[in-house]
Amino acid sequence: MCTTNLSAEEAPAPNANPNSAYFSPAVRASLKTVTFQAAANLSDTLIFGMLTGADTHTSLAFLFANTASAMAVYFPYELAWNTFGPDPEDTNADTLMLKTGAYQAITGVRNLALSYAFSGEVLSSAAFVVGVVLVDSVIYAANEVAWDIISPRASTPQPK
């Protein structure tokens, strides 16, 4: 269990499970990045290999490039959402769909460019993006729900 001192300005989410851990926004975003990217990049690599017929060396290179670029997009997106997104109390299924869809739109461009760079095939790259959006959206939403249970976001400080 992670324990940290909370300032008077920052408190765990009001409906937080008393057994859940509290992590600072940066640590929480880092951990969410690792858990999401571990699952998403494995599935992305499998989808890429199936659609392009890439050999092992190309698939490994793709895995490394995909992981690095995806983490570079996901982590700041997560921090920005934590800072500028709705308060935890205002988060619901619609918010989750918006957050998931916005991330998939941003990372979809990256996926298309990366797949095309490694395969040189426009149609398989487009199919890759469609497949990844479908699979990664489920992984993304599951990761969000899991982290809201493991370590709910802190409430936004109220003006005094």
Image (cartoon, grey):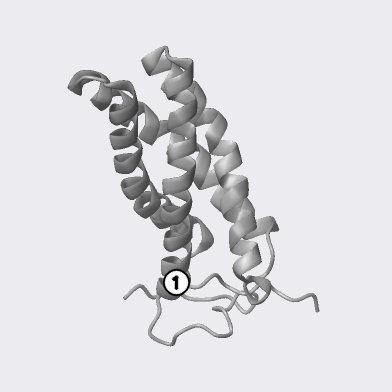
Residue 66 vs residue 47, the one in the foreground: 47
Could you tell me if residue 13 is visible in this image? yes
Label 1, on which residue? 151
Q: Is residue 154 left or right of residue 116?
A: right
Q: Is residue 62 above or below residue 73?
A: above
- Which x, y percent locates residue 103? 57, 46
Q: Is residue 58 above or below residue 22?
A: above
**In the current view of this chain or complex, which residue is farthest to the top?**
120
Q: Is residue 63 left or right of residue 137?
A: left
Q: As shown in the figure, which amino acid type bears the numbered disc 1? A: Ser
Q: Is residue 92 above or below residue 59?
A: below
- Which x, y percent locates residue 46? 28, 36
Q: Which corner quadrant holds the N terminus?
A: bottom left
- Which x, y percent locates residue 157? 69, 73
- Which x, y percent locates residue 19? 38, 85
Residue 159 vs residue 54, the one in the foreground: 54
Residue at horizontal 59 percent and vertical 84 percent from the top = 14
Quarter of the figure with residue 127: top left
- CA neighbours of label 1 inside 10 A, class few (<14), some (14 to 19), many (20+): many
